[in-house]
Image (cartoon, helix red, strand yellow):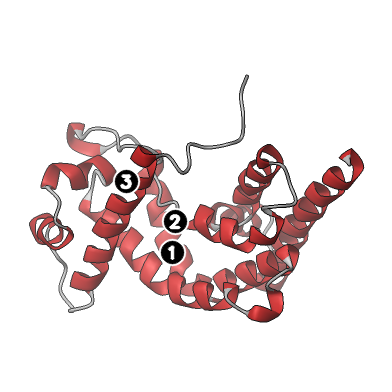
Amino acid sequence: MTTDKPARGGGREAQRRRTRKAIVDAAVRLSSRGATPSIDEIAAAADVSRRTIYMYFPALDELLLDATAGALNEPPVEAALSDPALADDAAGRVDVLIRTLLEYSPQSLPLGRRMIRLTVDPPLNGAPEPTGPRRNPRRIEWLDKACEPLRETLSEQSYQRLISALTMVVGWEAQIALRDVRGLDPQAEQEAMTWAARALVEAAVREHDHQR
């Protein structure tokens, strides 16, 4: 039987997330000095081997793009999701997440286009496939934080299905579809993305209410 619940919370998976974060954080710190760091420099700063870095990032460009996108988006998103006025409002928290991401999209979307191109193609030069997902779990973590008010309300299966569904309508891929396929301007893009995300949150809540 299949499930929408990903492998979360396990020791190995948690360690992978910590290792990946250490690598990205090291790349951010080194890049902030104004020069492009090498794999050896990043490995030393993250206290991992070169081989470990290539397990997560087959190409240096992919790692540097990931680090740049994180440095750009993480501070404003974390601040927005920490607003006490939205502490119990999952739909409102998802709204503000979308609004914040789109506010920074002029800088981040070009990075996203390059990141998608790097991660959808097979690794170059015979490099091994990365361990776990090809992309940083940053978006999942933000959606998880945004939907935290529903954590105790929905069943675990329903909650994880909601996060999976929101992953399809919040992020670079959704922006690219709305811009390149639908030809929407930024305001219409935000309205469409916000409407779709709110509809998913409200549908999950309605389903829970009907099952009680």
Label count reads: 3
Cα distance, mark 1 to mark 2?
5 Å
Mark 2 and mark 3 lie on one chain; the one further toward the N terminus is: 3
Q: In the image shown, does 159 or 42 lie closer to the viewer?
A: 159
Cα distance, mark 2 to mark 3?
28 Å
List x then y, in percent, for residue 164.
61, 44
Mark 1 and mark 3 lie on one chain; the one further toward the N terminus is: 3
In the image, taking residue 109 as reference, residue 179 lies left or right, namely right
Name the residue carrying label 2: 113
Q: Determine crowd level at label 3: few under 14, some 14-19, many 20+ residues with C-alpha closer than 10 A.
A: few
Q: In the image shown, does 143 or 116 lie closer to the viewer?
A: 143
Q: Quadrant of residue 65?
A: bottom left
| Residue ID at (57%, 61%) | 145
Name the residue carrying label 1: 110
Mark 3, secondary structure of its residue: helix
Disc 1 + disc 2, Cβ < 8 Å: yes
Q: Tell me if I can see residue 62 in this picture.
A: no
List x then y, in percent, for residue 56.
28, 44
Q: Quadrant of residue 197?
A: bottom right
Disc 1 + disc 3, Cβ < 8 Å: no
Measured along the vertical axis of the image, is residue 77 above or below residue 169? below
Numbered circle sitting on residue 15: 3
Mark 1, secondary structure of its residue: helix
